[in-house]
Amino acid sequence: MAITSKTSLFALMVVFLHSCAHPVTAKSTNSSLPVVLWHGMGDSCCNPLSMGSIKSLVESLVPGVYVKSLMIGSNIISDTMNGFFMNANDQVTDVCKQLASDPKLKAGYNAMGFSQGGQFLRAVAQRCPNPPMHNLISFGGQHQGVYGFPHCPGNSSTVCDYVRELLNLGAYNDYVQGFLCQAEYWHDPLNEELYRNKSIFLADINQEKVVNPTYKANLQKLNKFVMVQFSEDTMVQPKISEWFGFYKPGQAKVTYTLQESPLYIQDKLGLKQMDKEGKLVFLTAVGDHLQFTNEFFKQSILPFLK
Ligand SMILES: *[C@@H]1O[C@H](CO)[C@@H](O)[C@H](O)[C@H]1NC(C)=O
Ligand SMILES: *[C@@H]1O[C@H](CO)[C@@H](O)[C@H](O)[C@H]1NC(C)=O
């Protein structure tokens, strides 16, 4: 198939900018660590309907708090496009630089990642311990990747269809791995070895290739690692990946939990240790992907931002 140029896709993305809605508003508390947000696929730093409203919500619930909504690239369009077509490792490197160069984050910050922003921020925690991340909150992040790409946010699926075609063409194709970040967390349970060999992002941060002791040490510096799973998620397959579980190898039906996974049992990433120390928090939000209420946020998330 033909690979369309990035620029010709820019126009298509405009429709995405308004496709992700979070109905949110709110009230008050006391000041605390800054909060860093990383948006999901098809979204941007500054969409008033998504990250913009989350930013306002946090600002109203935590008066005086500094909220930084990450932009990857120099404007909203490139930020949105980079959520598809920029190598995840390069995105993480870019974010590490942004965080290190922001004087307001020097004393540390809490991080909230939305969808793929969840696993990307975990990579930040593992690779870039300065400034220190205090709590990591992952909303529908895919910590064991995805095997399936059922649909995209909203109804504007042109770029999504293109991404799906590429994934079908071969998520583990070296060319596709080089730039398509969804391919970089594609996890094929029917061919775990190929995944381990070829995934340039997820297999690395999940210690599938080699065990990097620095990743383990850095992740353990977190105070809490909060994972929110959406009970009716139709975007993420399997949705237990949002709690760090996945399909058992060799098939795509039966899943295992984090606690049943080799990663946990062998404690290659320190998750077992963190679990023992009460650092892992598993939350359920009732709804489809990234759909949660203000009430849920106030009750279940706000305590981790104080
Ligand atoms: C997509 O569009 C149809 C028709 O306009 C609408 O009924 C449906 O709710 C939309 N779906 C989403 C996910 O926005
Ligand atoms: C994975 O890499 C190893 C070592 O290079 C190689 O022997 C093996 O055939 C590869 N397997 C797959 C499925 O690519």
Image (cartoon, rainbow, N blue to C red):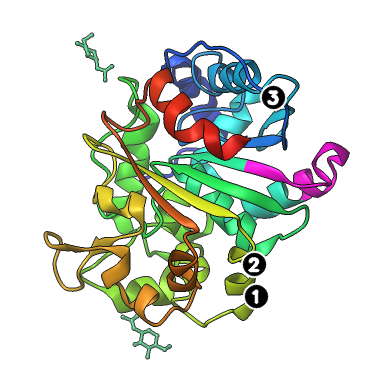
Q: Which residue: 26% across, 71% down?
A: 260
Q: Mark 3 highlights which residue? A: 30
Q: Can residue 180 be seen in this view?
A: no
Q: Earlier in the sequence, mark 1 or mark 3?
A: 3
Mark 1 and mark 3: span between their CA atoms? 34 Å
**Vertical placement of residue 246 versus 288, above or below:** below
* Residue 216 placement: quadrant: bottom right
Horizontal side, residue 214 vs residue 178: left or right: right
For discs 2 and 3, the disc positioned in front in the rendered view: 3
- Region of the chain picked out in magenta, as a range: 97-110
Q: Mark 2 highlights which residue? A: 218
Q: Ligand 1 falls in which quarter?
A: top left
Compare residues 45 and 271 and report the one nearer the observer: 271
Compare residues 36 and 47 and report the one nearer the observer: 36
Q: Mark 1 highlights which residue? A: 214
Q: Is residue 161 visible?
A: yes
**Vertical placement of residue 293 versus 204, above or below:** above
Q: Which residue: 60% across, 55% down?
A: 223
Residue 150 is situated, as x and y percent measured from the top left of the image, at 23, 39
